[in-house]
Amino acid sequence: MSRDRSLDIAVTGLAARFPGATDLAEWWSALVAGRVLTRRHTRGELLDAGMPRSLLDDPDFVPVHGHLDDADRFENTLFRVSPREAEMMDPQHRLMLEVAWGALEDAGCRPGDTSVTGVFASASSSGYLRAMVAGGGLDPLTLEDALHGTEPDFMASLLSYKLGLTGPAVAVQTACSSSLVAVHLAVQALLNGDCDQALVVGAGIAHPQGGHLHVPGGIHSAAGACRPFDESADGVVAGSGVACVVLRRLDDALADGPEPYGVVLGTAINNDGASKAGYYAPSVDGQEAVIRAALAAADVDGGSLGYLEAHATGTRVGDPIEWTAASAALGGTGAGPGTIAVGALKANTGHLDNAAGVASLIKALLVVKEGVVPPVAGFSRLNPLLETEDSPLYVPAEAREWRGPLPRRAGISSFGVGGTNAHVVVEQAPPVRGAETGGEEDTGRLVLLSAADPGALARSAQRLGSHLRRESSALGPMVGEPALADVSFTLAAARAELPVRLAVAGRTGAEIAERLASGAGVVRDEVTTGGLPAPALFLFPGQGSQHPGMARPFAEALPGFEDALRDCLAAFDPATAGVVRRALLDESFPAAELEATELAQPALFAVEYAASVALRALGVAPAAVAGHSLGEITAACVAGALDLADAARLVTVRGRAMADCPPGAMLAVGCDEASLRTLLAESGPELELAAHNGPESCVVAGTEDAVEAFRTRLGAGVPTTRLRTSHAFHSALVEPALAPLSAALAGITLRRPVLPFAANATGELVPAGARITADRFVAQARGTVRFAEAMETLARRFPGAVAVEVGPGRVLSALAVAAGLTPVALSPGRTARPGEEVLTALGTLWAKGLPLAPTALSGPGRRVHLPGYAFAGPRWMAPEARPREAALPGAPGRTPDAATTATATANGQLPDVRTEEAPAPAEDPAAVLAGLWADLLGHTGLTADADFFDLGGDSLATTHLARRIKLRLGVSVSLRDLLIGRTLGRQTEIVLGLLDRPVVRS
């Protein structure tokens, strides 16, 4: 009879920091190899960490610990945490934030933009707080800050606040079993509908990390090695680590999540009660009962399991009791003798305390996922005190393939001091519906990455590239090359949009990896935080930029373009629409036929208009538009002065009327306007200035003979280029077209534009709401195009704007650069992969901070597991937590030397001395206030417009500020005034006003 799967819970995301490994893949490889990951510290290391000499001199001190490297690092900027707040936070809380972020990313969730997500968190008691208190440097207010940053009551809510999660936030504290108890509570919350997703995170980080004092008869190993179930077992070794899992209901996870790592079938918790030898003693009855209860909740029997990840402390009392209890529970529910392999993570890493339960769960999930059973590290011979007769348990001494029943199932036990027991039953995950395999993409995909700083972005890019190059392996939890469509979609849908950004296009994962490594084709930029996106300007090129198939790149890579083009072509008469469509999409269309004015102008208008509609649908709303010659008609239409049908009719008439004009030629000349006019005056009336495009860029027009003669006359002394036109636009030769244009405009209703657009005739902006007359579009066909002046006007009106060339080519982009604008050519036509060029241009706009939705750029796909944020933040330690003889700058009564100051500055810590005990001179309240900001926030070098809240301050920090202002300057400032006057300059004015002193403005 098949199980009812409606109560099953999927594990969709993992993240952890474990001793002896840089990531989960390396950690899993170490477990399979049976490596011991604890470390024996040198005396010098322990002294540097702050261990008392008296302890190190004790002959019973064992300097072994599962050491977690870089436990003091924290990406405070990413989490909007000020330097001073980062110092005061327990390293456990800091790393819980980072692994929670990473687990959400691994689960395919964008942090801060998820479904209702609960947080179930546990951390060990704070050695960091004890160090601060022992140092004696905490005044009452600083102690309050320290408590908020270290006490377990606040950690779950802190995670919810910093990650934007709205489900229940619960701290769970049951000693060693805490995080597995948290898994049980999270499962219940999901089944009860309290949340749609649950984050379970546990941390156990000693401060300082060093070793333990062995006490005869105690639980700590005299040998400094944890050997569970071994005849030489003499106790446990401590370790440090942080681990996190993300849980969802199985049906939800299979519908839209990445492939689960495994499925939680059932959980149970209980307590031993008083029926045991003592409070610290374990109980066979309690442990057996919790395993049986979990199997019942899972609706499976013990015979269906092939693996048990045991609590396994390696103690002489604990191991035999656990072996007996598990044997009774599993054997009594159907498990045969010697059928269940036993795992013992503590043999590898040491006891991770409050993180031990989730760490064991992660190991068991990888066992059922990969089908490999790791050995118990260091195991030699079974403890003779274990009852092995008819026991279903056996201890593997080497790695082996799964030999148990299918589907692969495992149990996980975790038992806390005091008797709170937890057990979880897991199973390998069913296949995800609609899973895809890797392979080439026809048109390429866009890969987007972002981070809080350039270093993190570089690390993230390197990790992603390595992942995409990685070959399939039986020993990695995240292996194989995923489809590039899935990579692109996952990074778009499941990553936060941070200010430092990268975009790269390619057709395969291997190609993306190569480009990330080499930098070729990779766009990098940085978005200014706290402000609005840079304004966007749309630039529409004129005749001469056309080529057959010029719409193909947009159709391949610009979302929404094909629909917009279809709607645009419907505005033309059917015959025109048919030939325009072929010219736009067929690269083999005759180029000479497209150069004909009557076809080139409607074709350019159609591709430009459709591309602008698609861009606006993606979220890029132009602040103003400008077009060169014919492009001004497109600009006017996009601005709202012409509706689509009228604009289509106008460009059709304009193209035909100009085609009927006498033939001519045009020549681009690389010199300034004044010099060119002098040259033209010497050449006679047959040549005219058709366009002024830039400081050293003009165009002349006239008859074929006159233009050729002028080009010959200039020779090599002045750069010249013949343009691909059949007529001398913007010269006397097009005057026969003006009457048909006027007639056509007489039947067109001109509207007041809703966007400013640049006038070719003057270079000035036609403001939104201005009245438009028909003679404007007649005059612009004949007069000189003042595009240089238009660019200068736009640059003055919209400083810092991004000028998007919406059409084929990049001629206008060069003109935008000359005016000081930042150009992005949407289809520059520089490579053999024009579709990828469009993708890269869209990625460039996103990297510059324009509001494009990443999922619209990525295209469809499914969520997959990918490397997450590459954390490697500065090192943080509060001066109050350091040993007295090694206090950081700012510790009371100590002045830092140059070396200490340099180290602190390099680590992102305050280099200046905190001197709250020695008030600043009363005659300089502005300096006092700046110093108080530095004390509270950890930032120095502040300017008057520095914002208290942007720097990481909050309402609690504001109350501290008010209190310190009163202590230092003797005035009471209302909280309301400090909250409203949030900048340093405004708060200084408020304080000076209360002191009745003049405000000095620089």
Image (spheres, helix red, strand yellow):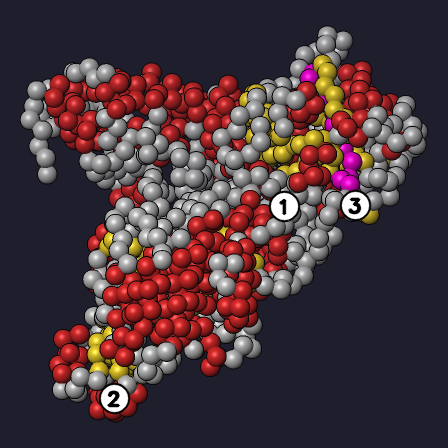
Are circles 3 and 2 on residues that touch, CB within 8 Å?
no
Instruction: Describe residue 112's horizontal placement relative to residue 176 as left or right.
Output: left
Instruction: Name the residue type under label 2.
Output: Ala
Q: Which label sits in the foreground, 2 or 1?
A: 2
Residue name at image x 27 percent, y 33 percent? 947
Alpha-carbon neighbours of circle 1 within 10 Å: few (<14), some, or many (≥20)? Answer: many
Q: Is residue 751 magenta?
A: no
Residue 728 horizontal/vertical position (percent)? 30, 79
Residue identified by numbered label 2:
706
Which secondary structure, mark 2? helix
Q: Which mark is residue 167?
A: none
Q: Amino acid at mark 3?
A: Gly
Q: Secondary structure at mark 1?
A: loop
Alpha carbon of mark 3 to alpha carbon of mark 2: how far? 82 Å
The part of the chain drawn in magenta is 419-430
Residue located 63% across and 28% down the image: 196
Tell me the residue that label 3 is attached to: 371
Q: Earlier in the sequence, mark 2 or mark 1?
A: 2
